[in-house]
Amino acid sequence: MITEQLKSTRARAGLTQAHMSEALGVSQGMISHFESGRKAITPANLDRWMTACQVSARQRSKLVMMWFEEAVQRDD
């Protein structure tokens, strides 16, 4: 699930939820919601997340595809 990947990507980058909230321009509570799945992350925020975590191009592709697959499932 993308929620697990968001949390692990942030942790691997050594960033706290507070750091991510600053990078994305959202509250720390919203970061928690993204990571728990209570709120779906938007494409723009996903891009900011990946930039803040300095993920590789390969990891970016993986996360974008995962986000897309889950978004399609939510819309069904």
Image (cartoon, helix red, strand yellow):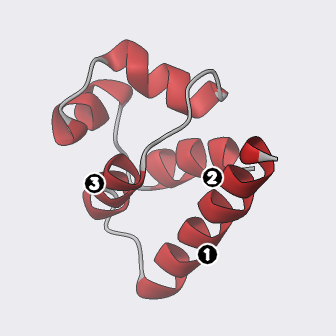
Residue 56, image quadrant: bottom left
- Residue under label 2: 5
Instruction: Tell me the SS state at disc 2.
Output: helix
Q: Position of residue 69 (x, y in %)?
A: 73, 63
Q: Quadrant of residue 19?
A: top left
Q: Nearer the viewer, residue 68 or 6?
A: 68
> Residue 21's x, y, as percent?
26, 29
Badge nearest the viewer, 2 or 1: 1
The answer to whether mark 2 and mark 1 are in CB contact below 8 A is yes
Q: Residue furthest top?
A: 29
| Chain-order first, disc 1 or disc 3 | 3
Q: Residue at x 52, y 31 (%)?
A: 34
Residue appearing at x 72%, y 53% in the figure: 70
Give the residue at the far front of this rendering.
76
> What amino acid type should be assigned to the residue bearing mark 2?
Gln
Question: Residue, x 57% and y 32% (percent of image)?
Answer: 35
Residue placed at 40% from the left, 13% from the top? Answer: 29
Along the line of sight, the residue nearer the viewer: 35 or 19: 35
Query: Pointer 1: what residue?
Result: 62
Residue 24 relative to residue 8: left or right: left
Please count the marks in the image: 3
Q: Is 22 rendered above or below residue 23?
A: above
Q: Identify residue for label 3.
A: 48
Count residues near mark 2 (Cα–Cα under 10 Å), then give few for <14, some for 14-19, many for 20+.
Answer: some
Mark 1 element type? helix
**Tag shown at residue 6:** none
Q: Amino acid at mark 1?
A: Lys
Rounded to the nearest angstrom, the CA distance separating label 3 from label 2 is 14 Å
Question: As shown in the figure, which amino acid type bears the numbered disc 3?
Answer: Arg
In this view, the residue in front, 66 or 10, is: 66
Q: Nearer the viewer, mark 3 or mark 2?
A: 3
